[in-house]
Amino acid sequence: MKVAIPANGDHLDAPTSPIFGRCDTFILVDPHSLEFEALANPARDIPGGAGVEAVQFVLQHGAEAVVARRLGPNAFRMITASRIPAYVLEGATVRETIRAFQANRLRRL
């Protein structure tokens, strides 16, 4: 399983980003092994539709769950249509967020 977490850095101890569509990086983490991949967000600087582009990007890279402080209505519809769960971001770092995910402490968006 891969969980997509918006971050401001490229490692597990990077701070999480409160902004999904325009974050610097997405960290895709396997919550069981903690193996991860850091991907620069190509939607960060586009003029409009960053949330939808970001969702498409993480789905193309195999995300099976998304964590975000919030999603815009179009991005949320896309996540819902993809039938993958979205959770409310909790944790100051990617590692803390994954720990909360592992402990089933994250609420569904």
Image: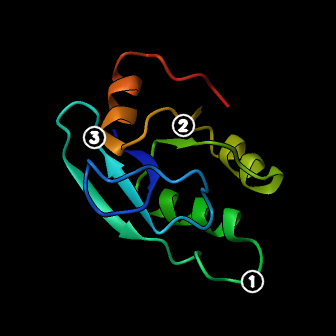
- Image location of residue 9, percent across then percent down: 34, 63
- Quadrant housing residue 50: bottom right
Q: Where is residue 89 in the image (x, y as percent from the top left)?
A: 54, 37
Instruction: Look at discs 2 and 3 and give the one toward the viewer.
Output: 2
Residue neighbourhood size for the residue with mark 2, other residues' Cα within 10 Å, grouped as few (<14), some (14–19), many (≥20): many
The structure residue drawn at horizontal position 71% and vertical position 48%, both measured from the top left corner, is: 71
Q: Estimate the x, y position of residue 101 in percent, counting from the top left.
A: 41, 26
Q: Distance between the residues labelled 2 and 3?
A: 16 Å
Which amino acid lies under the numbered mark 3 shown in the image of this protein? Asp
- The reply to whether callout 3 and callout 1 are in contact (CB within 8 Å) is no
Q: In this view, does 30 lie to the left or right of 69?
A: left
In the foreground, 76 or 105: 105
Residue ID for mark 2: 89
Q: Mark 1 points at which residue?
A: 47
Provide the residue designation for mark 3.
Answer: 30
Q: What is the distance, in whole Å, between disc 3 and disc 1 at their CAs?
A: 31 Å
Query: What whole-number distance in Å separates the C-alpha atoms at marks 2 and 1?
Result: 25 Å
The N terminus sits in image quarter: top left
- In the rendered structure, the answer to whether residue 21 lies left or right of residue 89 reads right
